[in-house]
Amino acid sequence: MERLMSSGKCDCLNVKEYTVQLRQLADQEADREGAKRRGRFFKALGDETRQRMLALLSVKELCVCELMMALAMTQPTTSHHLKILEDAGLIQDRKDGKWKFYRIRDTQKVSSLMEASS
């Protein structure tokens, strides 16, 4: 910060005061919860396997075993990816006896995401 001040690129006079002002600005302007939600959302979309899962689920509701077979994955790996998608609010589950089925939570939103990335 001192180098920035001495370069003339920053018009602050006191580094400590300016640091306090920046932190206050960040606390006021940065929506921490929103940032967490966006982080989960982009993490979910940032993986090829999860994108493939979304593509499959955009066609029809599937149970874990169907996703496992389609993507040639183990149950723990499949469940891990589904949990990330669920935490991001992209999918939701439904229990039917011992079976757990997954579907897209907001089909319009996911469809537009998949189209935009093509």
Image (tube, helix red, strand yellow):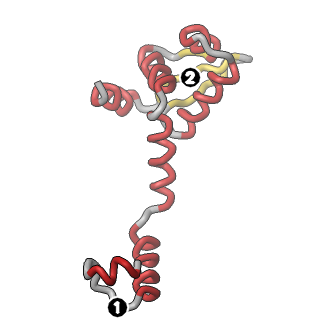
Name the residue type under label 2: Tyr
**Where does the image place residue 47, in percent across and percent down from the top left?**
48, 30
Q: Is residue 7 left or right of residue 58?
A: left
Residue at x 40%, y 81% (from the top left corner) = 2
The image quarter containing residue 68 is top right
**Secondary structure under the numbered disc 2 in the rendered image:** strand
Which residue is the site of mark 2?
Answer: 102
Residue sitting nearer the eye, 86 or 30? 30
Categorize mark 2 by other alpha carbons within 10 Å: few (<14), some (14-19), many (20+): some
| Residue 114 sits above or below residue 43 on the image | above
Q: Assess whether mark 2 and mark 1 are in contact (beta carbons under 8 angstroms).
A: no
Name the residue type under label 1: Leu
Residue sitting nearer the eye, 73 or 6? 6
Task: Farthest residue to the right: give it.
Answer: 98
Task: Farthest residue to the bottom: give it.
Answer: 13
Quadrant including the C terminus: top left
Which residue is the site of mark 1?
Answer: 13
**Where does the image place residue 9, in percent across and percent down from the top left?**
26, 77
**Where does the image place residue 79, in percent across and percent down from the top left?**
65, 25
The image quarter containing residue 42 is top left
Residue at x 45%, y 25% (from the top left corner) = 51
Q: Earlier in the sequence, mark 1 or mark 2?
A: 1
**Secondary structure under the numbered disc 1 in the rendered image:** loop
| Residue 61 sits above or below residue 17 on the image | above
